[in-house]
Amino acid sequence: MKTFLTPALRAQVVKEFLSIMRDKKTRLIIIIPPLVQLFVFAYAVTLEVNNISIAVYNKDNGSQAGRFIAQLSRASFIKEMRSVYSESALREEINMRHSILAVVFPADFSRKIDGGGQGKLLLISDGRRANSAQVAAGYIQEIAGKFAQVLHPEIKVPDPTVVRHWFNENLTYQWYVVPGLSGIISLLITFILTALSIARERELGTFDQLLVSPCSSWEIILAKMTPSIVIGMALANAIIAAAVFIFHVPLLGSFVLLEIGLLIFTIAIASMGLVVSALAATQQQAVLGSFAVIVPIILCSGFATPIANMPQILQYIAQGIPLTHYIIIAEGLFMKAMPAFIVWQHIGAMAVIALVCLLVSTSVVRKTLQ
Amino acid sequence: MTSETVVELSEVTKRFGSVQAVAGVSASIPAGRLIGLVGPDGAGKTTLMRIMAGLILPASGRAVVVGHDSADDNESLADDIGYMPQQFGLYEDLTVQENLQLYADLRGVARKKQAETFATLLRLTRLAKFTGRLAGRLSGGMKQKLGLACALMARPKLLLLDEPSVGVDPVSRQDLWAMVEDLLKGGMAVVWATSYLDEAERCSSVFLLSEGKVLYSGAPKKLTDRLEGRSFLLRGIVTQRRKLLADLMEQTFISDAVVHGESIRVVLHEGRSPEELGKLATSLGGKIEAVPPRFEDAFIDLLGGSSSRRSRIAEKMPEVTGSETNIIACDHLTKKFGNFTATDNVSFAVGRGEIFGLLGPNGAGKSTTFKMLCGLLSITEGSATVGGHELLNASKKAKLSLGYMAQKFSLYGLLSVKQNLDFFAGVYGLSGKVKKERIAEVIDAFSLGPFLNSDPAKLSLGYRQRLALACAIMHRPPVLFLDEPTSGVDPITRREFWSHINGFVSKGMTVMVTTHFMEEAEYCDRIGLMYAAKIIALDTPDALKKGAQQGPEEPTMEEAFIHLIKQQEEQQI
């Protein structure tokens, strides 16, 4: 070990750390955005539908409609019910996005029910916000089903499906998001820090100085990757700690495996960042280049949308993205104690990706050295 | 017309934090004259310039520029002046034409008049052939000329040029002078700030600033005349001149001494007779010869004489020994970038303990040659070796023999002074006790003690240069590469820098230096003059000057340089 960590390598690693940590602004950039992201993702971005406004156009004014509206008003997901009194007002209501959904009671709603028949509701949803509107429509259908059950207990409506969400029984959104977030944040920071490293030296003119010194290109690469890997892992661990202690996500699998996965993951990311850095002439190019790579990585990784829903070609590409594997590992180890051999398969996949990226980045860096 | 006063400064002051940048300057600048603003780094030249440009308001005192008080009438002032800062804001991603267009529009030049204005400016700058080229791809000299063209867009009454010739080769510098002389004829007043004193000599009057005060104002000739009878060349001491220089500087009767080709140029303190120097010369087997004083002699003398002494760091260095004779060697060295040949069949060899200078205009190929030698660029044909090794893929041991200091002092701005020293010591494999000792040694020798926790960017240029040199030599390399080491540095700092280099060379270190600064060429043992990718002349500075001699007077290095290039151009036609 002592021969490996030569004074030259140590000096470089120290220099890289200092270039990142000595500047107050860079320090803040490392700490503040990940915190903001943690809270944005954990609280603001939510897939649940809550606090919505719906429009009610009651052409009926009978007793049954009144009862139904009373039930709706007790539903917790609705913040406000806005009554409208004409077709045009209804149109306006959806158009202007005051309401995401409108419930229309036909004029014969109460009459039909009182006469022992079936009353029908009309739901108009805002297709521009299809996702939320669908979820809300689902909630309302559920309420309607219960309403019908009370009126006609004798009619055997086929039992509404009972859905049980394993591993996350209450569908707590944070349980689903926060473990993956540790991957996103270490991806961002590790990638950008390495991407800036060579570009910064090139821009400031210190890179030539480094090249004439007796450092080998392996030493330069190792020295550039180390701080970003260490900082990326530290941030990921901060998120993991937040997941366990703040959001109480159950960590059922092995913590050690998670750390190994994280290490391999950050190595892969740092080598990708290094390729961008070796190609960029200025720091500005490096930042733009980073985003050109990071955004597709996040979109294809399965963090936001399931990989299984993607076109076949993207599914293959997703397998080549380290974040995909890390998210599987993180979610697997957190909520369902994923068996070690599966974790190792994904770690292996990431190791292969890391190795390829490392070879590419070494050859790109070496080429730019000449 | 010429009696009209363009700038009137009265008791102008400006302070930045604890630094008194300008301390009560009064000056009056008439139209149609070229005024030099000279002084060491940090003397307040740029601040004074920015006050005249109305970009900084004086803390006290008044600045009246082209009839506008800079405090009350700031906006209309901007219409009547042209200001070219040290880094003129050219848009490097736009072409020459687009840059002109942009500045014309910004300056509100009427569209109808633009074509005519551009034609005049392009003719003046001789840039007409390059209108389609990106500004970022221009050479340093061409960039400065384009900057000047943009600054002239509004036909100002006062033109302020802040160190316009830094990094500009002698040929482009001549163009710049020609442009300025043209402008003066038109009645414009031009203020030219510079740390190159040969330029100051050409001004009709100079303001010599030091620590924010005017030490001298008036014709440069008058200041130079004060030194009549005090400047001498010490001849016949070729082999020992560098060691001798340090000894001379310790003599109380000497105000200043510099290596000048094969001689040493000595300036005596006021009132000292040349006899003492004569005796000293005879005892060394040389002789003295009285020479006319230069403005630089007067400048150094006015600032209290050269302060550089024997280099303490050089004394601690061990003697470099070894048997090889050609430490640095190029053999039929060629570099091609696509169809473009940057270095064409260059051969030379540098022996131990020699200072070899590579000179040439921008784009002549000296940087390319330099970079191939130190292993920063691959070689197309031929070979380039240092200590017998090609450095591009050399072993660590071979690279350890090289010390390197680049143009833009390649220090890590995000690291403190001490951290920079630690880093460079470590990268060159120093550790433990040796590392501590060497760092302590340079801190002591370069007086870096008080600045250890500062950022390099906050140091003065002189200290930054000391630090860069310290970082380059801590591992005691037998070979030192200097890429434009004193570009834009004032004469006092430059003397100090060369006192160290002289010391190293006396110990057997080999030095390779690129420069466009002609005075610096005088410090070299031999010079390779590069032009259009080839070495067109290679000899000692004195021999080069003799070769270019046409009249009775010995030409300056710059004249020799221009002569040789013109000769080459004629041969090609």
Image (cartoon, rainbow, N blue to C red):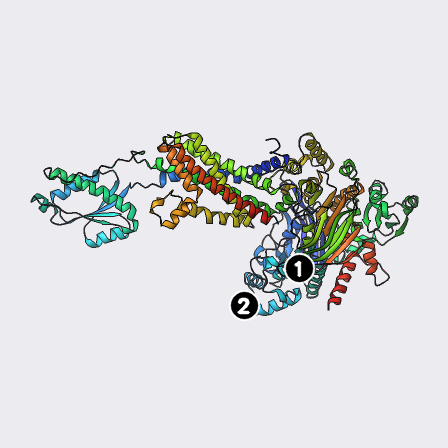
Which one is closest to the eye, mark 1 or mark 2? 1
Q: Residues within 10 Å of mark 1 (few under 14, many from 20)?
A: some
**Residue A180: horizontal and vertical position, in percent?**
40, 38
Disc 1: which residue: B341
- Identity of the residue furthest to the left in this view: A115
Residue A239 % position (x, y): 43, 34
The earlier-in-sequence mark between 1 and 2 is 2
Quadrant of the frame with the N terminus of chain A? top right
Q: Amino acid at mark 1?
A: Thr
Frontmost residue, B332 versus B296: B332
In the image, B312 versus B111, the foreground residue is: B312
Quadrant assignment, res A174:
top left
Provide the residue designation for mark 2.
Answer: B111
Q: Is residue B307 in sight in this rendering?
A: no
Secondary element type, mark 1? strand
Q: Which mark is residue A349?
A: none
Left or right of B292? Residue B59 is left
